[in-house]
Image (cartoon, helix red, strand yellow):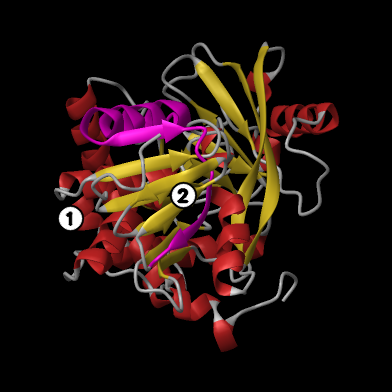
Amino acid sequence: MASSSAAPYDLAIAGAGIFGLSVAHRAIREGLNVVVLEADRIGAGSSGGLLGALMPHMPARWNPKKEFQFQALLSLERHIRELEEETGLTCGYRRCGRILPLTTTDKLEHHLERAEESRDRWHGQETGFSYAVEPKGSRSDWLNAEAAPFGIVYETLAARASPRDYLKALATYVRTHGKLIEGARVTGFDEATGTVCLDGDANGIRARRLVLSGGFAAFELIEKLTGERVGRGEKGQALILDGKGLEDRPAIYCDGLYVVPHANGTVAIGSTSDRTFENASPSPGRTAELLARATAFCPSLSGRTLLAEWAGIRPRCHKRDPLVGRLPGFETVYAATGGFKISFGIAHLIAEGLLADITGRVPNHPLPETFLPDHHFGENRLKADG
């Protein structure tokens, strides 16, 4: 471990999940000397999951948050290709598209309107992305027609990536061009001396700035520093089946679950959401439930071998949107956490926006106001069940 008397890093990042590693990747590319401090191991939290669904918001009631996510999904393919070229590793990315079943006449009418609105919101003529309503029975070799009595939506903006491969590529880049230390739990930051305090290390590490990106555990440290609790953990569970022959199928979102085929011949199913939980281990009952529900609307999954189960605690801000920016009362302490279900799709653009804030430049895509600390702290703060 480095001594606190060593030359300071420009930026220390607490947490080696998708937000922390994306911020590190961006900061290194902008010329900063970076260290990532991970309490356990890379992807030990919710970023080490299995699903990899990169899904857009519906093109309705458009707002800055939806526009930001659209721009993130639009630019993600190029970002990942550049990362793959930098590291020689694959991230399992593919623009796979998505199927949504229409189960009532109201939903059919609603999505016909969304299809019209998507032409403006998704700029279809320029981007080529479409959002189309198709009749009952369409794509029934994949989604059971009985699950979609009024037809389906098929949209082509949705994509998927392998979460663990994406993390591995980011971590490889950070290790090559910066420093990544596992088993280093950040417990605080002394702004006066620029010392990152570490559990079990009396010296700590010197850094000019600190970013807290440790998933749901970051909320505890943020509360310690600011006196305010702005988020919680929520357990999710997913699984992987043998998916040989399904690699080129689109993702399905049905009955509150995603089915996502991957390039390596597997198919992911998930995920559940539990506000209360005893631990982060997979529940056999939840696994059986996931299999039964997914097989009901996707019969092609029946009889396939279960390869892996996963469960993890995802970070969810009380006000739902991520928390990104400088913490109140501090000049050099920042946060980037609370991505919940959308982290992998937006992390690279979160990193770009945060680095713009840190370095004092104008971002290419401004962070939505609802992501900023002013939205989460003080008079705007919500309690856990608020």
Q: Which residue is mark 1?
A: 126
- Of 316 and 219, nearer the camera is 219
Relative to the observer, which residue lies in front, 335 or 135?
335
Q: Earlier in the sequence, mark 1 or mark 2?
A: 1
Q: Is residue 299 above or below residue 107?
A: above
Tally of marks:
2
Amino acid identity at mark 2: Ser
Q: Amino acid at mark 1?
A: Glu
The image shows residue 202 at horizontal and vertical percentages of 50, 45
Looking at the image, is 273 positioned above or below residue 211?
A: above
Which residues are drawn in magenta?
Answer: 162-191
Label 2 CA crowd tier, 10 Å (few <14, some 14–19, many 20+)? many
**Where does label 2 land, which residue?**
343
Q: CA distance from mark 1 to mark 2?
A: 26 Å
Residue at (50% x, 19% y) in the render: 246
Q: Residue at x 54, y 79 (%)?
A: 377
Side (left or right) of 70 relative to 154:
left
